[in-house]
Image (cartoon, grey):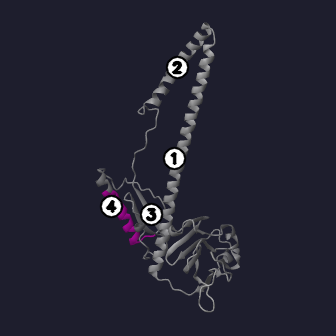
Amino acid sequence: MEAESNNEFQIVLSEETKSDTILCHLSHNISAVAMEIRWFKETDCVCFYKNKRLIEGISYEDRVSLPTDELERGNVSLQLKELDVGDYLCQVINGDRTEEITIHTSFKTDEDGFEMLPQTIWSKKIDKKWTDKERTEMANSALSAVFHSLEKRDALKEDLQNINGAVLQTEKQTQTEENDIQKEDLSKQKSEHDDMNTGIETSKREEKETKPENKIKQLSNQQPGCSDQKLPDNDSKLAVLVVLHHTFDPEKIVPDSSKCVTRTDILTVDCLFYEDEGLLKCQKNSDAYDKVVHWLIEQGRKTGIRIHKSRYRLTIIYII
């Protein structure tokens, strides 16, 4: 009974007004934590929430948020700094059920039609029919936001690796300086001993420095070509990005995801998928398969490497 009730919900627009928030919640205060939430301003993706992760639209970075601590109570309100007036679409997806609401926002006016000061946002539900072209633009905008988020994450990861490398280098340099100081102090102490003790300490030091393993270590530090150091992996790979579109209709028309990817080492193809059957047996999936094969062979010709159809290897870097 609980599973059935959780699958039946509506999006409700609150009558309360806030200047930076469009207040919406699910009927019966059903939890939205495990659901997918999408907000659009006209056809631009404002934000995209899925799997407890919020992705900001490209034009709304550092401006948008959702009340993630209140999703458990069904609060799906859009919080936006400097809220723009216009038409907003909110979509909430739970399994195979999708509910949406279109909201028009405008500035409140007085009886004479002048905007009230301070400016106050007024929101109301409207019955707007979005065209197929507009919905395709929405899907492409959401996909672009996902790719942009991945690129930012990769750049951040690279920055962290550089910072960690600098920290390790600093620690190594500090340790080297401390070792030099210790050696200098030890040398001063040895100079204060009598000739016999000095001779003994000197011979011990010389014996330590002439050990084969120490010489090898010194050589490996001085010569980059020694086997003690790890060579970088220069093996280049081709990547195929497969975008899965959930549907049971083998003739469904979907947006061309390749328009969102400009890298020449990545081939983007769209495939139709349904969880009970996997990849659908349809002309679109067959064309996508042939496109991948021909692309790999063409890349092999450009690089001078012969790629056999039975031996190529694909790397799927992202699926939504």
Q: Is residue 291 left or right of residue 217?
A: left
Judged from the image, the secondary structure of the residue bearing numbered disc 1 is helix
Mark 2, residue position: 209
Q: Residues within 10 Å of mark 3 (few under 14, many from 20)?
A: many
**Separation of marks 4 and 2 at Cα, in angstroms:** 61 Å
Judged from the image, the secondary structure of the residue bearing numbered disc 2 is helix
Occupied quadrant, residue 226:
top left
Occupied quadrant, residue 184:
top right
**Separation of marks 4 and 1 at Cα, in angstroms:** 38 Å
Mark 4 / mark 2, whichever is N-terminal: 2
Mark 4, residue position: 294
Judged from the image, the secondary structure of the residue bearing numbered disc 3 is strand
Q: Is residue 289 magenta?
A: yes
**Which sits in the foreground, 20 or 192?**
192
Residue 170 screen position, x and y as percent:
55, 38
What is the three-letter code of the residue carrying label 1? Asn
Q: Residues within 10 Å of mark 1 (few under 14, many from 20)?
A: few
Quadrant where the N terminus sits is bottom right
Mark 4 / mark 1, whichever is N-terminal: 1
Residue 101 screen position, x and y as percent:
58, 81
Residue 112 screen position, x and y as percent:
61, 92
Residue 242 got which mark? 3
Residue 254 vertical position relative to residue 293 in the rendered view, above or below: below
Q: For the magenta stretch, what is the residue range?
A: 280-298
Mark 1, residue position: 162
Q: Is residue 122 left or right of residue 41?
A: right
